[in-house]
Image: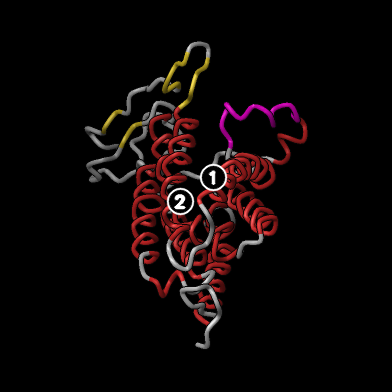
C-alpha cells in the first residue's frame, strides 16, 4: 500500500439546501449541464447550415432532460441490475439512491431526438449533430459529482502513483481517482474536440458526422477509463477481463464509425441542400 495516499474527505451528499428542498451533487450536475448546455446549443443550432430555431431548442430542453433521466434509469435497471429490480420494483423510483446508466441515457435522448425532429419537421442528423456536441459537458460535471460523492472509484493504484486516493467507501486501499480520469477524457477533452470540429463548416455540412464523432469518441474514452475503474461489485469482470461498460461501448463505437462514414459520403451545402461529393 502507498505510504502517504490522499485521503478523500466525506463530503455532504447534499450540495444545496433550498428550504425543505435538498439538492444533491448529482442533481446539481444535471441542472448545471442542462442550463449551460442549453445556452451553447442555441448558438450551435444557429450556425450555418441552421439546424433549428431558438424556440425549438428551448422546447427540446425539456424532452432532452426527460430522455436522460428515464433512459438513464431504465438503462441501469436493464443493463446492470435487472434481477434486483424485478424483485424490488418500488426501488425503481428511488432515483436519489443513485443508479443511472449513460448508455441508457444516450438511448433515451436518441428517442427524444427522433420524436422531436419528426414532430417539428427537422433533420434528425443535423439537429443531433449540434446537441451531441454539448453532451460531454454533462458527462464531465456528472463525473465530478461522482468524485465528490466518493462513488464509482477506481481500481487499486500502484505504490508510485502520487495522486492515489483512499475513498470513504472503498476500504483502506489507495485507488485510482477514475472519476477524474473520466471527467477529463469523456468530459473536458471530448468537449474540446467536439467544439473545435464543429467550428469547421465542412463538419456541419456532413450530417451525422458530429454525432458519429461523439459516439466513437465517448466509446474510446470510456473504454480506456474502464481500465482504471473498479467494476460494479454485483457484476465484476466479464470473460477476457472486460467490463460491462466496455461491452456497451462496442456498438456505440461501431455506430459512430458508420455515422461518420455516412456523413462524409452525403455532404450538404450551407443552405442545407445535398451536394455531390
- The structure residue drawn at horizontal position 33% and vertical position 36%, both measured from the top left corner, is 174
Residue toward you, 28 or 266: 266
Residue toward you, 194 or 150: 194
Residue 169 place in picture, x, y as percent: 44, 28
Q: Which residue is mark 1?
A: 58
Total number of numbered discs in the rendering: 2
Left or right of 23 on screen, residue 178: left
Classify 190 as above or below 63: below
Secondary-structure class at tag 2: helix
Classify 229 as above or below 217: above
Residue 242 place in picture, x, y as percent: 53, 57
Rate crowding at label 2 as few (under 14), some (14 to 19) or many (20 or more) other CA atoms within 10 Å: many
Q: From where the camera sits, is residue 101 visible?
A: no
- The structure residue drawn at horizontal position 50% and vertical position 31%, both measured from the top left corner, is 27
Disc sitting over residue 97 in the figure? none
Residue stretch in magenta: 88-99
Classify 192 as above or below 20: below
- The structure residue drawn at horizontal position 55% and vertical position 39%, both measured from the top left corner, is 233
Mark 2 and mark 1 in contact (Cβ < 8 Å)?
yes
Residue 191 place in picture, x, y as percent: 38, 55
Secondary-structure class at tag 1: helix
Rate crowding at label 1 as few (under 14), some (14 to 19) or many (20 or more) other CA atoms within 10 Å: some
Q: Which residue is mark 2?
A: 42
Amino acid at each position: 500500500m502507498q505510504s502517504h495516499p490522499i485521503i478523500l474527505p466525506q463530503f455532504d451528499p447534499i450540495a444545496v439546501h433550498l428550504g425543505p428542498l435538498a439538492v444533491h451533487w448529482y442533481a446539481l450536475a444535471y441542472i448545471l449541464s442542462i442550463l449551460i448546455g442549453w445556452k451553447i446549443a442555441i448558438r450551435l443550432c444557429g450556425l450555418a447550415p441552421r439546424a433549428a430555431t431558438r424556440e425549438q431548442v428551448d422546447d427540446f430542453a425539456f424532452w432532452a432532460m426527460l430522455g436522460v433521466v428515464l433512459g438513464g434509469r431504465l438503462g441501469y435497471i436493464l443493463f446492470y441490475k435487472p434481477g434486483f429490480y424485478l424483485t424490488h420494483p418500488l426501488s425503481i423510483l428511488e432515483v436519489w439512491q443513485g443508479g443511472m446508466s449513460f448508455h441508457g441515457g444516450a438511448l433515451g435522448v436518441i428517442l427524444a431526438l427522433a420524436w422531436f425532429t419528426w414532430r417539428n419537421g427537422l433533420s434528425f442528423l443535423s439537429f443531433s449533430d449540434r446537441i451531441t456536441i454539448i453532451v460531454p459537458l454533462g458527462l464531465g460535471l456528472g463525473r465530478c459529482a461522482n468524485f465528490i460523492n466518493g462513488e464509482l472509484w477506481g481500481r487499486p493504484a500502484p505504490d508510485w502513483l502520487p495522486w492515489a486516493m483512499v475513498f470513504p467507501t472503498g476500504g483502506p486501499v489507495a485507488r485510482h481517482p477514475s472519476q477524474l480520469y473520466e471527467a477529463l477524457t469523456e468530459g473536458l477533452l471530448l468537449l474540446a474536440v467536439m467544439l473545435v470540429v464543429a467550428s469547421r463548416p465542412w463538419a456541419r455540412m456532413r450530417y451525422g458526422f458530429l454525432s458519429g464523432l461523439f459516439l466513437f469518441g465517448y466509446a474510446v474514452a470510456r473504454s480506456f477509463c474502464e481500465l482504471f475503474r473498479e467494476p460494479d461489485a454485483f457484476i465484476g469482470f466479464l470473460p477476457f477481463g472486460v467490463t460491462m461498460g466496455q461491452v456497451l461501448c462496442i456498438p456505440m463505437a461501431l455506430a459512430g464509425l458508420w455515422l461518420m462514414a455516412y456523413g462524409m459520403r452525403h455532404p450538404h451545402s450551407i443552405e442545407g441542400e445535398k451536394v455531390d461529393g
